[in-house]
Structure formats: C-alpha cells, structure tokens
Amino acid sequence: MTERAPFGTWKSPITAEVITGNTANAINDVLVDAVTLVVYHIEGRPAEKGRCVLVETETGREIVPKEINVRTGVHEYGSGAAFVHNGIAYYSDLNDNRMYKVDVKEASLPQPVTPENAAFRYACFDVHPTHSRFLISILEDHSNDLPSAVANLLAVLDTERKTVSPVITGADFYAHPKFSPDGTKLVFQRWNHPNMPWDNSEIVLVDITLTDSGLTFSNATTIARDGSNSFPSWASNNTLCWVSDISGFINPWKYDVRNAQAMPILPSPVKEDFGGVMGRFCYSPYAIIDEPGTVAVWAAYRDGRAILYQINIETGEREKLESPYVTVECMRSLSKSRGQFTFLGAKVDEDTKVIVGSVVGGIMSFSSNITQSDAAPAFDPSFISVPRGISLKVPPNNDLLHVVYYHPHNPAYAGTSIDGEKPPCIVNCHGGPTSMAQQGLQWQIQYWTTRGFAWLDVNYGGSNGYGKEYMNRLALNWGVVDVEDCIMASQLLATPPYSLVDPKRMVIRGGSAGGFTVLNALCNSSNTEVYAAATSLYGVSDLLGLIKMTHKFESHYMFSLVEGSPQDTELFKSRSPINHIDKINRPLLILQGDIDCVVPKEQSEIVYESIKKRGGVVEYKLYPGEGHGFRKEETQCDALERELAFYCRVLGLDSGE
C-alpha cells in the first residue's frame, strides 16, 4: 500500500542513526601485497571515534590493535598512510606520527621503525624490491609549524636501524615515489608553490646506488614538466606510465627508459579525463594487468561517470570494457598472470566496496564476494533514488553546466498529496573547489530523497572530470563562477523545460570550499534571495584569514583561485563573505569542528557572531575533537538530524521526527 503526503514530510527507514556508526564505515584506500597477492583496505570507523583501521579484506581481520589510528597528517588531509609487502604491513599512526611495522601472518605486536618525533609526518611509501629494510617515504617536517616553514621532502627509512635519512629535497612538495622493479631507479612527482599539483607538476627519474650505509640517489632527470603530470608508476623496468593534461584533457603518457623518450600512449588525444586530480596520495586511475607490462586498465570519466578502458601501452590500442561502476578509485594491480586488478567501486545502487576485476581475452568480469568488516545498511534497494546526470545549457551562449539530480523517491509514497506541488530541493556544493560530485550511491543523499526532498549536486566550473578548459573556468574566479553556476543550475531546474523543483523552497549547503560558495550565494552574488536557507559546514568566510592560518599544502591555492597577491589583497577582501555578511537575510546553519587545521573554527565563529549581533537567524554547532570533515558517529548523526530539523523549521514542514 502506498500513500500520498507533502514532499519533505515522508517517513523513511533511512535514519541518521542507521547510516552512521558501524554502518557508515568508509573505505578510504585499497592495498595489495605484490608478493602474497593479498588485498587489504583502510577503513574509517565513526563508531570508534573516527579512527582508521587496516583490514585484511577477504577475512575482515583487523591488522592493528584497537588503539591504533592508521592515518597520516601529511597535507593535513592525509591518505597514503599504509603499505604491505611480503606479509609485513607498514603504517603511520596518527597518535604519535611514527611509522610502525607488523607481521600480518603472525599477528605480532607493532614495532616502531622511526624515532620518536611527533613533528615528523610520513606518507606515500614504497619498499625497495631487493632490500626491503629500506622504505622511500614523503617526510613532512613540522619542527617549525608555520606553514611557510614546514618542509616536505623524500626520505629513506631504514626499518632495521630505525633511522630517517632525507635524500631528495628542494621542491615544495613530493608524491608517489616508486622504485623500479629491479630497484635501480626511482620515479616521483614534484611541484612548487604557487602551483597545486593539478596546475603544474613534474615527473622526475633518478638513479639509485646501494651502499653499505643505505641508498644514494643521482642523475635526476625531469621526464615531464609541462602541464600537470601525476600518478607515475612502473609498467616494467623499461617503461613508466603517468597521466598528463597537456592536451587539454588528462590522458595516459609513457616514458621509455632505454631511449629516454616521453610520449602519449594514445595515438591522438581523447576528450575524456583519464583520472581525477592529485588531491589524495591513495588515488590511482590505472593498473597494469599483465606480466610484460604492456596492458593496463584505465578509468576515465564520461558524462560524470567512470568508465573503464583496456589500453595497450605499446600500441595505444584502446577498448572500452563493460562496467557497472560509476565511481572507480584507488586502482591497484593484483595478479598480472590472471589479468587481475582491484579498486574501490560504487554503483548507482550499491555503495563503495573493494572490487576485484579481471580481463581475460578482452572480457571483463568483477567479483566483490570478499568479506569486508563494514556493516552496510540493509535497506531495500527500491528506496534508492537513481542519479540523473544533466548537462544544462546556460544562456546566452548555451555553455555547458554539469549537474547530478536525484528525484524524491520512497516506495511507500505515490507522491505528494498537494496538487501541483514541486519538491523542496537541497542544492549541494562540493568542496575542493577542484573536486567533483560523483554518482556512486551515498546513503546521506538517500536520507533526504526518501523524505521527499530533491537533491542537486552542482559540478560548477572548476570541477574536474570535464577537461582542463572547464576546470580553468574557476581560475581567478573563485567566489564568482562557482556561486553563479549554483544559482543558475538551481533556477534552470526550477523552470521549464525541467520544472523539477519548487523555486521558493530551495536550500543550499556545502562543506569547506563548498561552504565558501554557500556563504557568497547568500551575500555576494547576482541574486542573494534564491535560497530559502543554507548550511555551511566548516566553510571559508575570510580569505585573508585563511591565507594567514591555513596549512602549507593550500597556503598559495587562493592566489590561483582569486587574482591577487600578498601585496594586493583587495580582491580577497571583496570575495570574502565576511565583508558582506550584513546582506545575509536567510536562515543559516553553521556546523564546525573545533580542531580543524584546514579551515579553523574562527572562520565560522566570525560569521555566527556577526549575524547574531544584528539579530539575524543563525544557528551554530561546534563539535569537539572534530577536524576538517566529521569522523565520529555522534557528530555525523547529530549533524544530519540537526540539518533536517533546521530545514523543516524554515520551510514549515512537519517531518514527524
């Protein structure tokens, strides 16, 4: 039996309590022991105060003790916190920032492999293939914790002597150091301020010599320097692969060590992004799947969804593979003799899982019948609202604007009981801002759609996945293009020929950079009255303050997003919501973590106090022990319920909850 009720008032079994805690375990990375071919993953545990755990994927067995948090503070966002080689797991513990090793076969107690020094942070490791006592690692030195004084470099960790030896320095940042299969060379990515890695970054190759005291490095050669070059890895001793956006789209490249020649793998550029931007160390858009190192499976984006290609690295021949996974991340080689690889994959109706894929004779097959320790919510799939990717045409030139729309859906309801009613719509601004709203299942979105809300993800100009030109729309225009794209997308979806949502009941929300977009939409845009209410989650409000207080990784980011310099700050002032707060006349909810080092709590508190002082409608919740993004069960649950209650009050909805 179905009933009818006004949109936004439907009863749903998808409660905040059910989709947080143990059921909200987030798989952050997938790892492969290249010797034993055992698959592992890193899992975030909201019910355990947000700690991350290293898990043997097939058995669900935890590799580390209960008090360990397998995370790293490198770049503040972390990732790339663990590596497993020949039955030995190496990982960073966020509790003290030290590196540890543990024998996964014997379940031995972890042993530290670096000296005590909380100022040293480690990430993104590789083990020397013939002398496994040596690890190569990013070392981020916070001995002087001012962003301008933090040092990033590559270091060799001697896991027997427990020593740390800086070996490659000089650049502002490094990523993805990888030993060649024979251990004679090292490749890595580097970049310098004011660039972010997706603006301009280089691939560098160096020779390695083994001595009695360790490894020495020489003959550094920059093999790719133009554009953004990311995710280097070895296909064989003679062939390196990576991705470059020099053509205008992120496409595969290779380097032949024998003749020192770099070239694109594909015979001509393809207008698709083969992978995303290098925001996380654990991300990888491809995997080598044969022993000679001539065949790879590559993930690309088409219409906002991931697709898979089999690519012959030698000939450039490309064949699309059938895949149901709209999100594909963290691809790793598994068994090259069997054409196997593994990755984190999500479908439109199935949340993220560790997936094993194999290609035999050009035929793609997948397996996910491996035990994962997360308890995914057991909801009837009929409750799921399937995303619809839409490329809107923006007048007057019909420029494309990419969005993902979720319609209200709940099998217990046949629709609204009010004639002609359109649903209220939650407009979501992703963070980054150089990021992307993807289409894999997220129960947090279904939380809203099953209650009769529409949900709109806006991949505004600056989002990745649609080519460099689309991403560059945001260059020097942050706080303008993102804001106006969100407003335009909202208005287009509310009017013919779409007419999908109620134009008077649209609310806007976003976290971090998305919060900056939210705040500017309310006070510094072409139409500050489009939205009936808003939620800012740890959002940026003061660009000058952020420049002074944020971490090293993004400390120069604003200079490419907003035209200006440390000496010329007028545009930073004009783009900062805090300088226009008096124009906010819509109810605002602010949610913030109290130990956020990326967007400090002062950024939220100044907005709250300003609106409160003049009698505006504003609510503020500060969550103890939370950083940039909410990891704890009680925080995630409260934030969802608080946001729902806020919208129901503002829109006059009776949620019954």
Image (tube, rainbow, N blue to C red):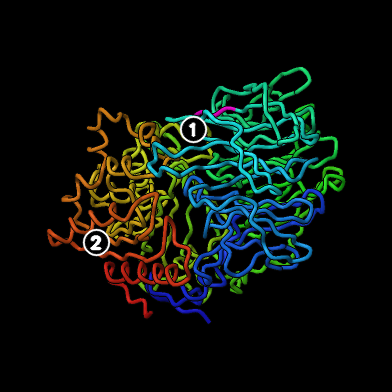
Quarter occupied by the C terminus: bottom left
Secondary structure under the numbered disc 1 in the rendered image = loop
Lower sequence index among marks 1 and 2: 1
Q: Is residue 172 magenta?
A: no
Residue at position x 53%, y 73% from top? 411
In the picture, the disc for residue 587 is 2
Query: Does 601 appear above or below 544?
Result: below
- Point out the stretch of residues depicted in magenta: 197-202
Amino acid at circle 2: Pro
Residue 357 x, y percent position in the rendering? 76, 52
Marks 1 and 2, how far apart in space?
42 Å
Residue 73 x, y percent position in the rendering? 50, 51
Q: Residues within 10 Å of mark 2 (few under 14, many from 20)?
A: many
Find disc 1 in the rendering and name its residue.
172
Q: Quadrant of residue 149?
A: top left
Q: Is residue 201 magenta?
A: yes
Q: Is residue 280 visible?
A: yes
- Look at discs 1 and 2 and give the one toward the viewer: 1
